Image (cartoon, grey):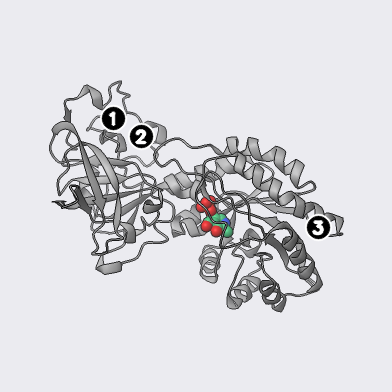
Amino acid sequence: MNKTLQRVNLSANVSRAAKTNFSTPQHSNTAHPVGISAFSEYPATPGDHPIWRIPTPSLILSPARAVENFKAIQRAFPDATVGYAMKSNPHPSLLAALSRVEGAWFEVASRAEIQALVDIGVSGDRIFFSNPVKQPAHIAFAVQHGVRLFAYDSEHEVEKLARFNDPAHPLEVYVRMTVTHRGALWPLTHKFGVEPRRAVELLHLAKARGLRPVGLAFHVGSQCVRPDTWAEALGEVAPAWKMAHEAGLTLDLIDLGGGFPAPYTGPVPLPHEIASAVKPAIEACVPGAKRVFLEPGRGVCGDAADMVVEITGLAQRPDGQTWLYVDGGYFSGLYEIPDGIRPAVQPAIRESRPLGMHTYRLAGPTCDSLDTLFEMRSPVELVPGDRLVLKTAGAYVYSVGSPFNGFPMPEVLHEEEWMLYLDDFRGIC
Ligand SMILES: Cc1ncc(COP(=O)(O)O)c(C=O)c1O
């Protein structure tokens, strides 16, 4: 956090519910019955509002929100082990907050991720390594730090894991399977995973090499808005589970992966709705699965951060479109936008302007044409100097951003200090 920034003297414990009230520019939390349609002008956000003091681009992070989301998943699946997929947002304050949640585990993919957890006192017995293809040095590091659970989906990986195995105290391994990804905006199925017959072969192979095969895993794809997809995936896993048991392998672990959606531009199924679809399928498809693992990333951290950017340029182009250039973009971590994972936008303007629909093509600051975001319809004309809050920028933004072309990555600020009162900005684009 930039020490030169003035802190906003606001209570840190204003609840999310209070903040979502329609508040006046004086920040009263009095609920107000009118919406934007009652105005002929889009109101200015006063000059002393925190939005104008924030450096841009920045991410306003709420570890407390991530903790709430995590606990909602735990409550929906009370018998499961929930491990945060830290690749989605490994900010230290978020990891620290989650590490204090009772029963919280972490899903990792690399040595550096384990190191980040070790640094905050998370021990290996709360970590599982779900990257199916690992680097040997990373396996060695994991084992050295007490990690016992590893995913795999190839013969080569069995050999790698066997090199670090102690047959007297074997590593537990589970096979990643390929499953349906209907309803997922970001499918993950092609790169990893095997079919049922191959899964059983790999379980046998692991056993033959002295490892302890304990179960099966899958991932329905990220931002999955269809609860039945997890149930259908379990149906695809069932033949492997059955074959393994018939062949004398006693499996007790099923890893349902991540995929829990974040509310980008509208409501999405809640954890308990997903649980209602999934629980009967667990009993039917993987009987005897005493250990149920979940690896949510986006569903934990997605709405735990918003990005604030400033409009730095405006131009009419020969394609007939009006382009708006902002100081954060694809390379600031918004790389999922071209694939359809798009934030809602709340504009903040410096002086009131008439209401009226305007269509803009939003683009980031770099010279790369990949750095083009999305088309946006704004209820007010926007000009350089205005700011935009890009909602739900908590997942795969902080972890992916780069300083490409010399543009700084978003600074991370904490919501407890930088309360934005988002409902002061009345439009949603
Ligand atoms: C192995 C694994 N587990 C969990 C996740 C988290 O997925 P999500 O953010 O959709 O919950 C991912 C995402 O890439 C993954 O690869």
Left or right: 322, with 68 as reference point: left
* SS at badge 2: helix
Q: Quadrant of ligand 1?
A: bottom right
Question: Taking 346 as reference, is 134 above or below it?
Answer: below
Left or right: 301, with 241 as reference point: left
Q: Residue at x 24, y 48 (%)?
A: 361
Q: Residue at x 75, y 60 (%)?
A: 197
Can residue 118 be seen? yes
Give yes or no for contact between labels 2 and 1 (Cβ–Cβ under 8 Å): yes
Image mark for residue 118 = none
Q: Residues within 10 Å of mark 1 (few under 14, many from 20)?
A: many
Percent from the top left, x then y, of residue 39? 19, 25
Left or right: 179, with 421 as reference point: right
Can residue 297 be seen? no
Q: CA distance from mark 2 to mark 3?
A: 52 Å
Give yes or no for contact between labels 2 and 3 (Cβ–Cβ under 8 Å): no
- Residue annotated with mark 3: 244
Q: CA distance from mark 3 to mark 1?
A: 59 Å
Q: Amino acid at mark 3?
A: Ala
Q: Is mark 2 within 8 Å of ligand 1?
A: no
Q: Is mark 1 within 8 Å of ligand 1?
A: no
Left or right: 70, with 63 as reference point: right
Image mark for residue 19 = 2
* SS at badge 3: helix
Image mark for residue 23 = 1
Say whether disc 2 or disc 3 marks the residue closer to the N-terminus: 2
Percent from the top left, x then y, of residue 400? 40, 61
Question: Taking 191 as reference, is 347 above or below it?
Answer: above
Q: Amino acid at mark 2?
A: Lys
